[in-house]
Amino acid sequence: MKITICGSIAFFENMLAVKKQLEERGHEVNIPPAHIADESGMMIPVLEYYRLRKADHPADWIWERKREAMKNYFEKIVWAEAILVLNYEKKGVPGYVGANTLLEMGLAMYLDKPIYLLHPIPEMDSKEELLGMKPIILNGVISSLCV
């Protein structure tokens, strides 16, 4: 199966590990790029970009890259047969799903693609929207992902 992994870029290392695990099971997997071009075109690690984005006063180029990344990721969701959302704890919220990931899930839902959620739906303002997307909850067990 072709799978696009979604979730906070803060979980990038987890994405790499899950990608490897899924590929070992014969799946084709897309994740965010490991590097992003900075304002001078120099490639920087995606986690450095994330750190810069979270700074007090991020530069304008940060938002240009964010827009590009969002549009490019939508293409990865179109390509996929399903998405897997890695919703680990973040900001003190177990199963956290951020706004960007919610957008990606919404696109997958619109395209009638299965949405797998690694952990249960979190207690967040968007809980009703998440419930309405009817994700398949894996309860932390990647190996239970199936078509």
Image: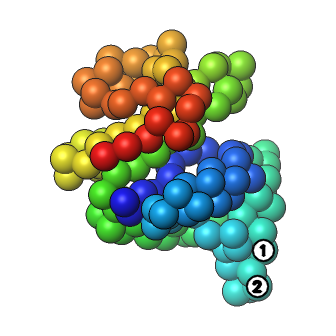
Q: Position of residue 127 (x, y in %)?
A: 40, 18
Q: What residue is at 48 percent from the left and 63 percent from the top? A: 26
Instruction: Classify 10 Å Cα crowding around label 1: few (below 14), some (14-19), many (20 and above).
Output: few
Q: Secondary structure at mark 1?
A: strand
Indicate how the structure is coloured in the image. Answer: rainbow
* Amino acid found under the numbered disc labelled 2: Met
* Amino acid found under the numbered disc labelled 1: Ile
Disc 1/disc 2 C-alpha distance (Å): 6 Å
Q: Residue furthest top?
A: 123
Q: Is residue 102 left or right of residue 19?
A: left
Q: Is residue 143 left or right of residue 73?
A: right
Q: Quadrant of residue 47?
A: bottom right
Q: Position of residue 42 (x, y in %)?
A: 76, 85
Q: Position of residue 27 (x, y in %)?
A: 46, 62
- Contact? badges 1 and 2 (CB < 8 Å): yes
What residue sits right under mark 1 in the picture?
44
Q: What residue is at 25 percent from the left and 42 percent from the top? A: 109
Rendered image: mark on residue 42 = 2
Q: Quadrant of residue 79?
A: bottom left
Instruction: Classify 10 Å Cα crowding around label 2: few (below 14), some (14-19), many (20 and above).
Output: few
Q: Position of residue 135 (x, y in %)?
A: 34, 31
Rendered image: mark on residue 65 = none
Q: What residue is at 69 percent from the left and 69 percent from the top? A: 34
Q: What residue is at 38 percent from the left and 62 percent from the top? A: 2
